[in-house]
Image (tube, rainbow, N blue to C red):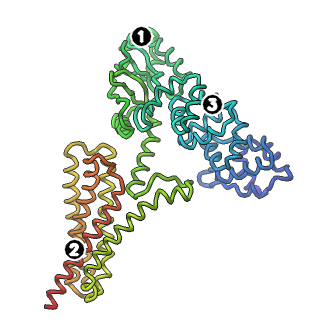
Amino acid sequence: MNHKTKLDYRMFCISRNFIGVIMSEENFSETALHNISVSDSTKTVDLSKVSDVIINLLEQELNENALDLFASFHPVDKAEILIEMPRLLQYSLLKTLEVESIREILSTLDPSVAASIYSLLPETINTTVLNELSADVATDILRALPEVDAQAALDKMDHAEDVLSLIVYPDDSAGGLMLPPYNVVKATRTAGVALDALRLASEATTDINIMFVIDDNFRPVGYLSIKKIALARASTPIPTLMKPIPITVSVSADQEECVRIIERYDLQCLGVTNPSGQLVGVIDSEDLLDVAEAEASEDMFKIAGMSTEKPQASISKSLRGRAPWLVINLATTFAAAGIIQLFESTIAKAAVLAVFLPVVAGQGGIGGTQTLTLTVRSIALGELPGNRGRKLLLHEATLGILNGIYLGLVVAIICSLWIGNPLIGLVLGVAMFGNMVIAGVVGASIPLILRKIRQDPAISSAVVVTTFTDIVGFLLFLGLASLIINNAST
């Protein structure tokens, strides 16, 4: 083994002694060490190669070595290493881990993956692990389990009431995202009481950024920063320290609305209230970052006509998610081809027209997709309330006109110089102008119409927009060309 490989290996081994143990095992393949790579620019380890090394160790029953290597990583990296391993070896590794390590791993995973890992845990520790998880993570895992298994796990939990208070809400609502309100103090108390309450709350969760102040009916009336609680005299009344809460959300609020609110008001956490206005939960801003990422990914997939998919998804799952929309897109392309066939005789008389069909279709499609992306994003971020949708439509139509004018002039000049026929250049320029205007209007209209009829604005909008611009572009270009050619022949 060369010097660089040894240094790379030390970067993720627990100690120099551990390397010596591994390298002294005669039945351990040294080539496994060479398969591990470290990026020189970021100093990060190729975790898939680490997973291969751990698999080799477990297969050769070097369980202690495998565990020492695995334990040297951050919980996020541990999770990635674990999901790369076969199920049987996942079980072999999990049964040797401490409860705290398993808790950290499950907390970093998507609920469906975490549930899959949880189902592998030995019965001797699975309830203990579930009890150690925060209420929101435990709830997400139980939702992803089969109903019978979830109920059995719930029956054994020490604090099942915390999970039961969350599991009744949809997982994409504020109620499904919130934690129980551990961080509360009554407005009639003092800073010393608030500090004691903070210490008590820290035993239940580490996700505490502020303390909510409530009245005698458990309604939120303000909040306290941790800094103010720590620095204030113990006898200081809470009302003199607290600030008013800018906004709270109801338990039924959609998760997208929660993301918009926490971004708009730059909140560290968001209070959740029931219909009576009582504080029933708290959503941490860091949890909403994951929600925002998931929502953005979902919208991008929908715009492209795909179901949510991850790089490690199976071939069959990827195929099921993409095939239906590819078939729909195929049908729309045949519709565009049908328009071209209507002008078959025109193209036969001037075959050069076929050369410029991709120009018309391509520019219209790109222009429409630009507008579509802006509109879907604006709707998702709540930037188009009331009549702003109409203003956006007018804005995009005007932009389409301006784009159409200069692009029409450019393609008309290029076409005229290329084929030496100013009339065909004029036809292409007019078709380009019309298609860019249509692209702007349609790209903005489709998401707005879908929102109006209470449908997801992102659902396969790109397929509809590109089809529409293709058909309109072909009709304009070939229709005008047909008129000119027919008039010229008469």
Instruction: Quickly name the residue at label 2.
Output: 476
Specify whether 343 is left or right of 81: left
Residue type, label 1? Arg
Q: Are marks 3 and 1 in contact (CB under 8 Å)?
A: no
* In-front residue for pair 118/401: 118
Disc marking residue 189: 1
Q: Residue at x 25, y 89 (%)?
A: 349
The Cα atoms of the two marked residues, 3 and 1, are separated by: 36 Å
Q: Residues within 10 Å of mark 2 (few under 14, many from 20)?
A: many
Instruction: Quickly name the residue at label 3.
Output: 129
Expressed as whole percent of the image width and height from the top left, the position of residue 74 reads 63, 40
Q: From the viewer's perspective, is residue 342 above or below residue 447?
A: below
Q: Quadrant of the C terminus?
A: bottom left
What kind of element bears circle 2?
helix
Residue type, label 2? Leu
Q: Mark 3 or mark 2: name the one nearer the start of the chain.
A: 3
